Image: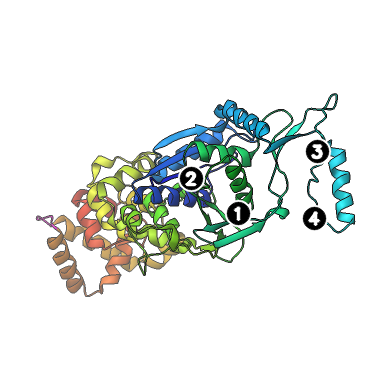
Amino acid sequence: MTVRTRFAPSPTGLLHIGSARTALFSWAFAKKHKGSYILRIEDTDLERSTQESVDVILGGLEWLGIHHDEGPYYQMQRMERYKEVIQQMLDAGSAYYCYCSREELDQMREEQRARGEKPRYDRRCLHNQQPRDGVKPVVRFRNPQDGVVAWDDLVKGHIEIANSELDDLIIARSDGTPTYNFCVVVDDLDMKITHVTRGDDHVNNTPRQINILRALGATPPLYAHLPMILRDDGQKMSKRKDPVSVMQYQELGILPEALLNYLSRLCWGHGDDEVFSIEQFVEWFDLNNISPSPARFDMKKLFWVNAQHIKTTTNTKLIELITAQLLAQNIALEQLDLNAIIELVKARSDNLNTLAKEVAYFYQPLTPSAEELAKHMTAEALQVLNNFASAIEAVNEWSLDAIKALIKEFCITQNIKMPQLGMPLRLKLCGTTQTPSFDAIIHILGKNNVLARLRA
């Protein structure tokens, strides 16, 4: 069997972090089995679907590096196909017209509740197909009445639901537009989808879709319903409190490969492995290894994973990623060895924004706080810095080893400890005491820059 998976978002908002995990798992499973990953845009909700949302989804997937093999297919471009299948079902008797008004349906449900019954359509139009003047009918699927619909979910295990619990759902509205559950079935059938990976909020749709597929004479795909992603405190993630959009993580300075790495660990794992490449993930991944329990999103852990990826990312790539931020500050990058700066500070950064700030103070010293100045820029400290400037001026060999030797000798001759030089020196050169080793800073800045900042 050739594996064919799909990711089918509705373009009604942002690309949610949970949807990104669904796309990742669908994509990885297809890659693992040398299959195809299809992108499908389910845009039949005309009131809420927007081109802006489509662009956001496509942009988010592009940034993550989850590239589709086929598509994107748009449901609104397949209307004629849906109408064709609906007519086939009407002709076969597996669907029927329903002329009931909203008022009739409401009254029917009220009467059922009064009798202690579960509200469901009572099939009155199945046995009375007489058209009504001025009424445009909907089309309902004739759901089986007996037995159960069952499937072996690749995440949740065996699930079965009595057909008597299922309604004859509407598959085409009165204006002729098909409904979500029907379009999904036709798309999965036409696109020969073998494995459907989606959130477990779709579990209730699955028995309906399986019954429609069987009515069409098709074999249902295998289903894997992924558990929810919760906040670290166990509550649902929300747009108001949490960064739920994929592109918000880009703004936070997260590398796409780090976000994919972290998302892959939400309900799936490979032993004790925490940090790995997307290639390793594809090699290890299997839908059968997904836990059915909800995952908890830990921002601190995400930033830790991001820090590990920053450490192993090439300096060239990191420079490419932060150059725009640096140029926005009118920094003349050619004045210093940017590669050497990146090499020095990248182990200190857990996101690209912090990395850019660490790089920036080499070019433009920060403004120290009043507290830092009062604590470290005493009269004694200023005298030490003045003496150190004279020592720097006398240096002929500008190498890291020579600078280290100079610092050591200076502290001995001045009879001071290293922090008595280091703290005010960091503040003077960079505007902050939170810096890497100051001998490396001096070496990168160069003699002229060091002297200019010491005497400023």
| Cα–Cα span, label 2 and label 1 | 28 Å
Residue located at (64% from left, 48% from top): 208
Disc 4 to disc 1, how far (Cα)?
19 Å
* Residue count near mark 4 (Cα–Cα under 10 Å), binned few <14, some 14–19, many ≥20: few
Q: How is the image coloured?
A: rainbow
- Residue type for callout 3: His
Look at mark 2 in the image and give the residue it sits on: 247
Local SS, label 4: loop
User: Residue 396 magenta-drawn?
Assistant: yes
Q: Nearer the viewer, mark 2 or mark 4?
A: 4
Question: Which is more foreground, mark 1 or mark 3?
Answer: 3
Q: Is residue 270 positioned above or below 83 on the image?
A: below
The one nearer the camera, 156 or 355, is 156
Q: Earlier in the sequence, mark 4 or mark 3?
A: 4
Residue 10 visible in the shown view = no
User: Label 4 belongs to which residue?
Assistant: 118
For residue 429, side relative to residue 132 (left or right): left
User: How would you rate the neighbour count of disc 2 (Cα within 10 Å): few for under 14, some for 14-19, many for 20 or more?
Assistant: many
Please state which of the two labelled residues, at mark 2 or mark 1, is closer to the viewer.
Answer: 1
Q: Nearer the viewer, residue 411 or 63?
A: 63
Report the residue at 44% width, 61% height from top.
Answer: 288
Q: Main SS type for the magenta part?
A: loop
Q: Which residues are magenta?
A: 395-399
| Residue located beneath label 1 in the image | 203
Disc 2 from disc 4: Cα separation: 43 Å
**Residue under numbered circle 3:** 127
- Residue ID at (86%, 55%): 113
Amino acid identity at mark 4: Lys
